[in-house]
Image (spheres, rainbow, N blue to C red):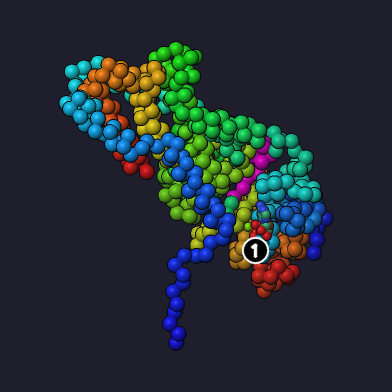
Amino acid sequence: MTAAVAPTRFRRRSLAEYTGLVLVLALVVSSLAATAPSLDKIGRGVARLFAPSGLVMQMFPPDFSRIVPIGWKLLETLQMAVAGCALGLVFALPFAILATDRLSPHPLIRTAARALIALFRTVPDLVWAIVFIIVVGLGPAAGVLAIMVDKIGFAGRFFAEAMEETDPGPQDALRAIGASRLGLIVSAVIPASLPSFTATSLFALEKSVRGSAALGLVGAGGIGVDLKVAFDLFNYDEALAIILMMLALVIAVEQGSGWIRRKLI
Amino acid sequence: MNAPAHPAQVLAGSVAAGPVLAVDGLSRAFSGSKVLDGLSFVVPAGQATALIGANGSGKSTLLKCLIRLGGEPDAGRIQMLGCDVRALPPRDLRRFRARVGMVWQRHNLVPRLSALSNVTHGVQARLSGPRSWFQALAPAEVRAEAMACLDRVGLADRAMARVDGLSGGQQQRVAIARMLMQRPEFILADEPDASLDPQTGQEVMALLLGLVRQDGLSLLVISHRLEHTLAFSDRILGLAQGRIALDLPTAQANEPGLRRFFDHGVAA
Ligand SMILES: Nc1ncnc2c1ncn2[C@@H]1O[C@H](COP(=O)(O)OP(=O)(O)O)[C@@H](O)[C@H]1O
Ligand SMILES: [Mg+2]
């Protein structure tokens, strides 16, 4: 019996594979060189952060003296998220139906719906907020519209995927009965997709709450504007208080939606 | 054997009228390979006709072709319930499909909904809009009719049970109740007994035959069980090599010959 010989540690690679590897490395190194901060810059920055007059020292202790007005703004932030998310989910459903292979009335309509959903999803919500500030002016209305459009993009895609994945059998059966397209969608497709719709909707709400906290930075309502003002006026201790309250809101919503998801699925 | 020119005969105690279905030269190919190759046959009204054939011989394809589901046939004429099926424009096709009840190998019910809601869907054959979507929204007379259909299949006491919680045989019976809710004139059934245990499969076949004997409906049923074919049909059609290779009254069928046909698609 001959002893089994271990294979070489690394597989032989072709010239093309080596070339590819070198190109990727070159891309990473050149990108780092162009944009990443130097080590001593980071070192000096961290030292400044923790100096006696630095940002961290000025943040502590957090200043909760304006907790009541900040609390109201936090509520407005949550309301923006809920309103924008609800509107987004309502409009996401028809977009999703038009975007599916099986239910779309025409391939051209399907392509258009998919393109719109992709556009809504790809452009960041902060950019949508700036667009809607131009349309409806500063304030929470612009934020609600931005969240709505972002959610049509997010939920539209996942709603469509959920509907594509449903069992085609019941739909064929209803088609054979002579059911209309709408009857088919409401009585066969949506009931079968409901668990997935619910999960997507809860994720959309979490995403909306996280997003709505930042929208104020560009003037689209909510608590973001208070954070920006606190930073601009060097009220770092109040800024920390706002950040902590935002964090509490996001965690509360995520915990709540996680709990509902576990209950339902 | 070819289809008889005048299939109207008195068989097994049922009074047969003219044909409910006449197919002439029907062809269907999938990417070049001909599954149905210019086949012709006739199904008499008021009778149970069984369609047999080896696995993959094209029985399901044929059944779906008859109501233009899953793609159009390549050639041939289909005359069903007085309609030239292939010439129907979309709107009339929907109205025509409503008159044909289809029972599938898998029950194809909507999961998560109650038995009663699934049966209510059958009313979409003649009623559209929210009142046909769920039992809770349906008018009182629709709910009453749906209950009667469930009662017909022996499941009135499970009306509010979710269908995904029912047994396989119960699910197939709910599917039959949904088909009855359609008030069909002609029933097409694709191996309704295939996914059921022998006892339950037999009950389902007996239920379908009862609709022929008691309600005067016409039935074309695919079965892959020899004993069911013999016990629950008036006439047997055999499909092989894309053509009707067997067409005879069940009373004249001999078991070994049918067995050969089931296994190899060779004429009895
Ligand atoms: N949609 C389809 N696309 C391609 N081939 C198909 C399709 N449907 C059926 N076939 C083929 O047609 C033949 C007959 O299938 P089927 O009608 O399901 O047979 P049966 O019901 O008699 O078992 C099979 O060879 C199958 O592979
Ligand atoms: Mg089949």
| Image quadrant where one finds the N terminus of chain A | bottom left
- Residue with the most extreme right position: B5
Between B32 and B34, the residue placed more toward the observer is: B32
B104 vs B51, left or right, is left
Give me the residue at 49% from left, 14% from top. Answer: A135
- Residue with the most extreme front position: A40
User: Label 1: which residue?
Assistant: B55
- Residue A261 in percent (x, y) is at 35, 40
In the rendered image, the vertical position of residue A118 relative to residue B180, given as above or below = above
Between A232 and A66, the residue placed more toward the observer is: A232
Bounds of the magenta segment: B94-103
| Image quadrant where one finds the C terminus of chain A | top left
Between A111 and A47, the residue placed more toward the observer is: A47
- Residue B45 in percent (x, y) is at 71, 50
- Residue A96 in percent (x, y) is at 53, 34
Name the subunit of mark 1.
Answer: B
Q: Is mark 1 within 8 Å of ligand 1?
A: yes
A32 vs B60, left or right, is left
Q: Secondary structure at mark 1?
A: loop
Residue A247: say if magenta: no
- Residue A56 in percent (x, y) is at 22, 29
Give me the residue at 24% from left, 33% from top. Answer: A47
Disc 1 marks which amino acid?
Asn
Give me the residue at 62% from left, 66% from top. Answer: B226
- Observer able to see residue B90: yes
Taking the image as four quarters, which one is ligand 2 found in? bottom right
